[in-house]
Image (tube, helix red, strand yellow):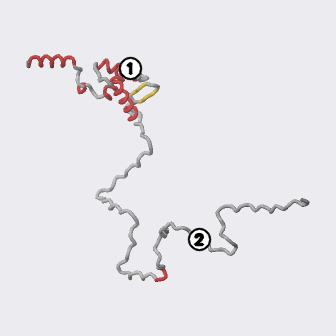
Amino acid sequence: MASVSEEVQNQLAEVEPPLAGTMPPYPEMILAAIEALGDPNGSNKSSISKQIEATYGSLPPAHFTLLTHHLNRMKSSGHLIFTKNNYLKPDANTPPRRGRGRPPKPKTPLPVGFLPPPSRPRGRPPKSRDLDAPPPPPKPASAVSGRKRGRPPKAAATAPPPPPPSAAGPPRGRGRPPKVKPAVTAPVGA
């Protein structure tokens, strides 16, 4: 029975594509494909893909997705230049591409033996006290009013006190008072 499993393993080994470890990384394959194509205006994605397939044979099923991902990363990092839908290798004399945002300030080297000061604690620093000075005088009693500092607490929600009774008559109701109608007089000559 051992011979049957060996035969199956041998057949599988012949059918299986080479492992991904035998292929170089995608950035290297992309740069090699661009060099092999040698177009002065650059190479587009499909020609790079065909060159890699022709050179390395069997590729992973997600080859086109991986190629797109690595082309975008190499373009954003400055390893490739993208012009007119073609990818070019950058010239050796061109300066590296600057990232977004403000560049960092150049750091000046510290002198030898320099120790940075300890970091300050948060908050307002305490008032400096002179040990030889006399203690501050006590605050006068008039400064202390007996009330607490800050906004007073909200009072409990209570009904407002009733208005004082007025001598004019019954208390007024809510809203607009009704319109007073003139008295109707009897017609003359009736």
Q: Name the foreground residue: 184 vs 65.
A: 184
Q: Name the foreground residue: 159 vs 97.
A: 159
Q: Is 184 left or right of 81, judged from the image as shown?
A: right
Percent coordinates x, y for residue 102 in the rendering: 44, 45
Residue furthest toward the right? 189
Q: Residue at x 52, y 68 (%)?
A: 158
Q: Please name the residue that numbered disc 2 is placed on.
A: 162
Vertical placement of residue 132 versus 100, above or below: below
Q: Quadrant of residue 19?
A: top left
Q: What SS does tag 2 mark? A: loop
Q: Quadrant of the N terminus?
A: top left
Percent coordinates x, y for residue 109 in the rendering: 34, 52
Vertical placement of residue 95 versus 187, above or below: above
Q: Quadrant of residue 136?
A: bottom left
Q: Amino acid at mark 1?
A: Ser
Q: Which mark is residue 47?
A: 1
Q: Residues within 10 Å of mark 1 (few under 14, many from 20)?
A: some
Q: Residue at x 40, y 27 (%)?
A: 88
Q: Residues within 10 Å of mark 2 (few under 14, many from 20)?
A: few
Q: Quadrant of the C terminus?
A: bottom right
Which is closer to the viewer, label 1 or label 2?
Answer: 2
Q: What SS does tag 1 mark? A: helix
Q: Amino acid at mark 2?
A: Pro
Q: Residue at x 49, y 82 (%)?
A: 142
Percent coordinates x, y for residue 111 in the rendering: 32, 56
Q: Is 100 left or right of 19, judged from the image as shown?
A: right
